[in-house]
Image (cartoon, coloured by chain):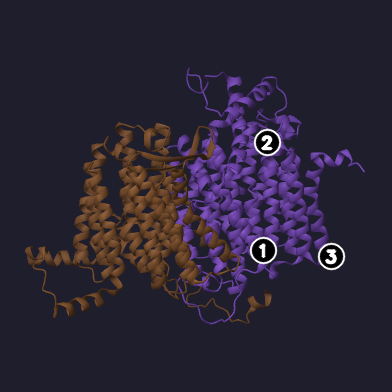
Chain colours: A brown, B purple
């Protein structure tokens, strides 16, 4: 391996090693101090950022840097390629992930000072950085899926970061459900690529598919991308994800995770180009999401949710650009949107303070920005739209009523049938406490 | 002083691994003291003997030896993990009998011995009254499976007069009747639809850790790989039925688990749904599917025993009335148990970086190749299981600020070491999967191709594809071994150790 290949491996693996090391030490009962943890985080991401700078410099003269480790595992004719690759498409995303993870780490060292989950947050930040760098530097859809899943699980665990309240945990569960349902598209899509094209690699060995096969694969990947990018009809999870700490919201839903879906579509662009149907669907979903996002965002009452819908609107537009094949415009749009949103999210908790400062500086209230575009609509329509926006386009309601509720009803019916045959000896009675006193039988028996 | 020759024979180590638990069980039940120590020593002896067996086994033919090693280690871990409340002589004795029976079933090449091992494995559950009287379904399930396999083996032995599995391979002994009875036995023992209900009942009413070990002996899958596939190659057109039933079980149980609130039942459903995938993978007849099934066998076994063990520890410490209907917030007091629980559960449903990811990936590849439509249900079932598991995890460990007790033990040192070992196994296995995957794939390649070769030799190469000859992609390693297999099959020689291992 040459020096740049070494650097690529270091950039991807370093956060994962830090996560594994500190996780193992914690399991063995050692908890690092906040100062040490934030210092190591800073050093790690500074090194990663320097490494990324070197990769960017190299990519200006070379089309790609590839590191091939062989197969992660191989059976028969199937093998899981373990290949890292950065090219002109992926290197901006790798840079974004490394730089923003470092910035968020530094911000969080102060923001989460003396928070009980300080170590947990930093471990998950490192795991997330590893997952996102793996996804962006993957040389195949297979490896991208592995990083994709890691990003998903860390996202869910950080939504439930404030674990002493039920709401964040329940919202994390909801997001996890959406992620898992949509990830089926990615898994089956990758299978289809292997099955029909014999490969799921990027670069020169990109799967060559045409006709119905290309359409099917594109639609499957679109399902996965829509779930990850909170596109309609899966947008309902985004405001729920705001339950997590602000720094994680910034990097996940302002910058990296929310744009991972767009990155997947950018990677699948040669396949999308084969299918007018899939490209049209990408444009349609993007346009619907952009409109949905801008309307719902106007009725959002809190800063983070407003920002989330503003991000969503832009991601919808990015989807449109991808659908039209404007690849580099989409990349530029993603980079701009991600950096601006991250800054806005991080400033959101001190927004009132900022406004007061601005008002003081100008010597009074800021002048209004002018008329809102929705005021051009008739009053009835405005009212209807307002109600529609307050319920976030009824997307959650539709999903809960037509997907979740029927499933739970079937499950409850089966459960009733089950219990009819053999009544449970340990039926849970409502209101019966499960906690025991410190001198309870559990203490005596252990 | 030279070592006697008989000590170095494989049969000696097999005897040690099987006899040690039974002898220890007799000692534990008679002496009734130091049960945990005796149990640990016996399980450790079995593990050491199994390790030697794995080491001595020919390359690519160590499936059963590996499973013996896995089950011995797992039993050792389970005995260490048992809370003090549960580690009385009766429980440990029962676990040791279960270990001895399971190892005997894995190692035997004789139908009658397999039958004895099968029946002995359920004796502790019937004899010790572990399953309460209200739970009739576990009794019916276990007894029906025993009856079915007894009838099948009786029929086969009566018809052929031979009880050696290796002598009966490829002969369809007992015809459709024996085949059907074996399928019935596998369905009842594995908890495949329509006999799925007893598994959750057993987990709810029985002792948790022994029940987990009983489920994870995977006798149903063992029956498929040891008898059904190699003895009845001509009935391969009936195998898809088993696959469809297995996939239906995976989906049905996954849906059933969505509204379940009893953690014991919920974990049993998860284990059942995920282990049903093993059968569909075995049936897929692709190298990816079969390898995925065998690796998944390992993942399901290890992770569910760990999950049931942690649940039992929680029950002992926080009360047995745990429920997934509300948030309990136990992670505040038991963070290491929470983290171990999360990693084991996510490994079960295919978290990247764990061995579960590899097995799921291979299973999906294999099953979708053979059954493009029904195979789609496999990732759907896994997704539902993942959501169910995360619900259980979040309800048990998160979502509440706990007050009311001041000191509550997290994982004790002995528990911590065992759980760390299990977690490391799954994580290192996931990071470096080739050690596990290649081991199984080499075994699978040989057997799968051997079965196909047998079909082709008997019926001609074009019997199943009109006039088109069939070509199966094989690895170079397989090609090398195929020469021996074709020779042995063509000359009617012994098929020893070819039955999917």
Q: Quadrant of the N terminus of chain B?
A: top right
Which numbered disc, 1 or 3, marks the residue that appears first in the sequence? Answer: 3
* Residue visible at 20% across and 51% down in the picture: A287
Chain-order first, disc 2 or disc 1: 2
User: Does label 3 or label 2 sit earlier along the sequence?
Assistant: 3
Q: Say whether mark 2 and mark 3 are on the same chain.
A: yes
Q: CA distance from mark 2 to mark 1?
A: 32 Å
Mark 3, other Cα within 10 Å: few <14 / some 14–19 / many ≥20: few
Q: Which mark is residue A126?
A: none
Q: In the image, is residue B492 above or below residue A230?
A: above
- In terms of image quadrants, where is residue A163? bottom left
Give me the residue at 44% from left, 56% from top: A47
Q: Position of residue B161 (x, y in %)?
A: 76, 31
**Left or right: where B251 falls relative to B479:** left
Q: Report in which chain the residue with disc 1 lies.
A: B
**What's the residue at 61%, 20% (across, down)?**
B457
Provide the residue designation for mark 2. Answer: B61
Q: Is residue B241 visible?
A: yes
Q: Which residue is mark 1?
A: B81
Callout 2: SS: loop
Q: Badges 2 and 1: C-beta atoms under 8 Å apart? A: no
Q: Is residue B410 above or below residue B152?
A: below
How far across and how far down the image is residue A288, in percent? Answer: 21, 53
Q: Nearer the viewer, mark 3 or mark 2?
A: 2
Q: Secondary structure at mark 1?
A: helix
Q: In which quadrant of the rendered image does the C terminus of chain B lie?
A: top right
Q: Is residue A153 left or right of residue A23?
A: left
Callouts 2 and 1 in the same chain: yes
Question: In this figure, which residue is indicated by the disc labeled 3?
Answer: B31
Q: Which quadrant would residue B137 be assigned to in this image? A: bottom right
Q: Is residue A227 visible?
A: no
Q: Where does the image place residue B15, in percent across and percent down from the top left?
A: 80, 45
């Amino acid at each position: 391996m040459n020096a740049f290949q070494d650097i690529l491996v270091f950039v991807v693996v370093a956060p994962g090693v830090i996560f594994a090391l500190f996780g193992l030490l914690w399991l063995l009962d050692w908890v690092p101090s906040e100062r040490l943890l934030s210092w190591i985080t800073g050093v790690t991401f500074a090194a990663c950022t320097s490494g990324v700078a070197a990769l960017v410099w190299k990519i200006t003269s070379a089309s790609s840097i590839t590191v091939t480790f062989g197969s992660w595992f191989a059976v028969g004719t199937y093998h899981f390629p373990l290949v890292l690759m950065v090219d002109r498409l992926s290197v901006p995303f790798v840079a974004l992930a490394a730089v923003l993870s470092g910035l968020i780490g530094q911000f969080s060292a102060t923001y989460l000072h003396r928070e009980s989950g300080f170590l947990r947050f930093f471990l998950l930040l490192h795991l997330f950085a590893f997952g996102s760098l793996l996804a962006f530097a993957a040389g195949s859809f297979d490896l991208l899926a592995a990083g994709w899943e890691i990003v998903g699980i860390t996202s869910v665990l950080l939504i439930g970061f404030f674990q002493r309240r039920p709401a964040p945990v329940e919202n994390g569960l909801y997001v996890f459900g959406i992620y898992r349902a949509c990830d089926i598209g990615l898994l089956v899509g990758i299978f289809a690529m292997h099955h029909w094209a014999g490969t799921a690699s990027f670069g020169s060995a990109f799967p060559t598919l045409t006709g119905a096969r290309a359409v099917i694969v594109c639609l499957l990947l679109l399902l996965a991308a829509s779930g990850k990018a909170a596109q309609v009809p899966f947008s309902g999870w985004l405001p729920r994800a705001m339950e997590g700490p602000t720094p994680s919201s910034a990097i996940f839903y302002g910058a990296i995770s929310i744009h991972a879906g767009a990155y997947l579509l950018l990677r699948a662009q040669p396949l999308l180009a084969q299918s007018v149907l899939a490209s049209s669907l990408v444009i349609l979903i993007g346009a619907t999401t952009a409109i949905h996002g801008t309307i719902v965002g106007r009725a959002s009452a809190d800063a983070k949710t407003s920002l989330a819908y503003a991000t969503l609107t832009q991601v919808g537009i990015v989807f449109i650009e991808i659908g039209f094949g404007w690849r580099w415009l989409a990349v530029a749009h993603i980079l701009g949107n991600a950096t601006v949103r991250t800054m806005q999210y991080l400033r959101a908790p001190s927004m009132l303070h900022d406004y007061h400062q601005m008002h003081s500086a100008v010597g009074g209230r800021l002048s209004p920005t002018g008329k809102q575009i929705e005021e051009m609509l008739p009053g009835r329509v405005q009212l209807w739209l307002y109600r529609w926006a307050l319920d976030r386009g009824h997307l959650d309601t539709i999903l809960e009523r037509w997907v979740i509720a029927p499933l739970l009803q079937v499950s409850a019916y089966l459960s009733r049938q089950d219990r009819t045959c053999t009544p449970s000896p340990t039926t849970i009675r409502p209101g019966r406490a499960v906690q025991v006193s410190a001198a309870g039988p559990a203490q005596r028996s252990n | 002083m030279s070592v006697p020759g008989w000590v170095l024979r494989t049969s000696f180590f097999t005897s040690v691994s099987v006899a040690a638990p039974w002898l220890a069980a007799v000692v534990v039940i008679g002496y009734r003291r130091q049960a945990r120590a005796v149990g640990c020593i016996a399980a450790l002896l079995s593990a050491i003997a199994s390790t030697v067996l794995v080491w001595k086994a020919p390359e690519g033919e160590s499936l059963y030896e590996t499973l013996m090693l896995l089950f011995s280690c797992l039993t050792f871990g389970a005995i260490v993990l048992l809370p003090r409340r549960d580690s009385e002589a009766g429980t440990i004795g029962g676990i040791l009998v279960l270990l001895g029976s399971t190892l005997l079933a894995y190692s035997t090449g004789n139908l009658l011995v397999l039958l004895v091992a099968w029946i002995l494995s359920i004796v502790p559950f019937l004899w010790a009254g572990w399953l309460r009287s209200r739970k009739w379904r576990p009794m019916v399930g276990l007894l029906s499976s025993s009856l079915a396999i007894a009838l099948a083996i009786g029929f086969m032995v009566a018809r052929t007069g031979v009880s050696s599995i290796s002598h009966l391979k490829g002969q369809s002994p007992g015809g459709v009747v024996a085949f059907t009875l074996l399928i019935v036995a596998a369905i009842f023992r594995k908890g495949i639809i329509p006999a799925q209900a007893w598994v959750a009942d057993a987990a709810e009413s029985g002792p948790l850790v022994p029940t987990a070990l009983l489920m994870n002996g995977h006798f149903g899958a063992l029956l498929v790989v040891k008898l059904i596939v190699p003895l009845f190659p001509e009935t391969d057109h009936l195998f898809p039925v088993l696959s469809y039933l297995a996939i239906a079980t995976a989906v049905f149980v996954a849906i059933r688990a969505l509204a379940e609130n009893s953690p014991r039942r919920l974990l049993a459903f998860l284990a059942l749904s995920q282990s049903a995938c093993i059968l569909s993978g075995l049936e897929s007849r692709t190298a990816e599917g079969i390898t995925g099934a065998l690796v998944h066998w390992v993942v399901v076994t290890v992770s569910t025993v760990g999950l049931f063990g942690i649940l039992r520890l929680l029950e002992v410490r926080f009360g047995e009335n745990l429920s997934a209907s509300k948030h309990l917030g136990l992670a505040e007091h038991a963070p290491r148990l929470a983290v171990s629980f999360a990693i084991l559960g996510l490994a079960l449903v295919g978290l990247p970086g764990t061995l579960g990811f590899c097995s799921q990936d291979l299973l999906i590849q294999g099953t979708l190749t053979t059954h493009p439509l029904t195979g789609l249900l496999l990732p759907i079932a896994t997704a539902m299981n993942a959501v169910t598991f995360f619900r259980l995890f979040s309800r048990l460990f998160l979502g509440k600020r706990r007050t009311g007790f001041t000191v509550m033990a997290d994982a004790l040192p002995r528990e911590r070491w065992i759980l760390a070992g299990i977690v490391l196994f799954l994580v290192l296995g996931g990071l470096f999967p080739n050690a596990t995957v290649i081991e199984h794939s080499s075994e699978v390649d040989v057997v799968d191709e051997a079965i196909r070769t047998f079909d082709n030799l008997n019926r001609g190469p074009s019997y199943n594809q009109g006039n088109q000859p069939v070509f199966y992609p094989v690895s170079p390693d397989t090609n090398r071994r195929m020469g021996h297999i074709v020779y042995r099959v063509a000359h009617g020689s012994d098929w020893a150790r070819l039955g999917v291992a």
